[in-house]
Amino acid sequence: MIKKVDIAHAGQSPEEALILLETAISTAKSEPNVVAVKVVHGLGSGRIAEKVREWAKNQEGRFTAVIPGEEYDAFNKSAVDMRSQLSNKKDRDFNNRNPGITIFWL
């Protein structure tokens, strides 16, 4: 299962959004059926998206892969491999090049 977490639509600061992100990732890692976390960070000013992706780079080795939404498609090997672990493969963001999300493959 892909767990979806929206961290950008409550009007919080980038720092508060990162706290929500860390909490969501930590919680998801303890849930047995969760394969990945889809983080909705939106576009807006781009500050939260930038912070999320910067945070992901600083977490190198913690995740199997981090897939930017604009690369979440059938041409991305990590995206395809991650999706092979899902029982329900329906996901409206797959192949839609959505820069407002980032996928964390646990």
Image (cartoon, helix red, strand yellow):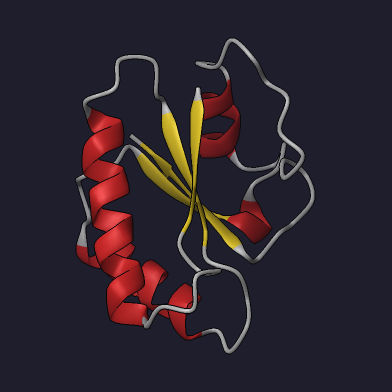
- How many numbered circles does the render carry? 0
The single residue placed furthest to the front in the displayed view is: 10
| Left or right of 53, for residue 86 | right
The single residue placed furthest to the bottom in the displayed view is: 45
Residue 104 is situated, as x and y percent measured from the top left of the image, at: 41, 45
Q: At 37% from the left edge and 77% from the top edge, which residue is drawn? A: 51
Q: At 55% from the left edge and 16% from the top edge, which residue is drawn? A: 86
Rendering quarter of residue 59: bottom left
Residue 50 is situated, as x and y percent measured from the top left of the image, at: 44, 79
Of residue 8 and residue 67, the one placed in the foreground of this image is: 8
Q: At 60% from the left edge and 29% from the top edge, which residue is drawn? A: 80
Q: At 47% from the left edge and 85% from the top edge, which residue is drawn? A: 47
| Left or right of 20, for residue 10 | right
The single residue placed furthest to the top in the displayed view is: 87
Of residue 27 and residue 47, the one placed in the foreground of this image is: 27
86 w.r.t. 19: above or below: above
Residue 71 is situated, as x and y percent measured from the top left of the image, at: 64, 54
14 w.r.t. 27: above or below: below
46 w.r.t. 78: above or below: below
Rendering quarter of residue 57: bottom left
Quarter of the picture containing the C terminus is: top left
| Left or right of 12, for residue 55 | left
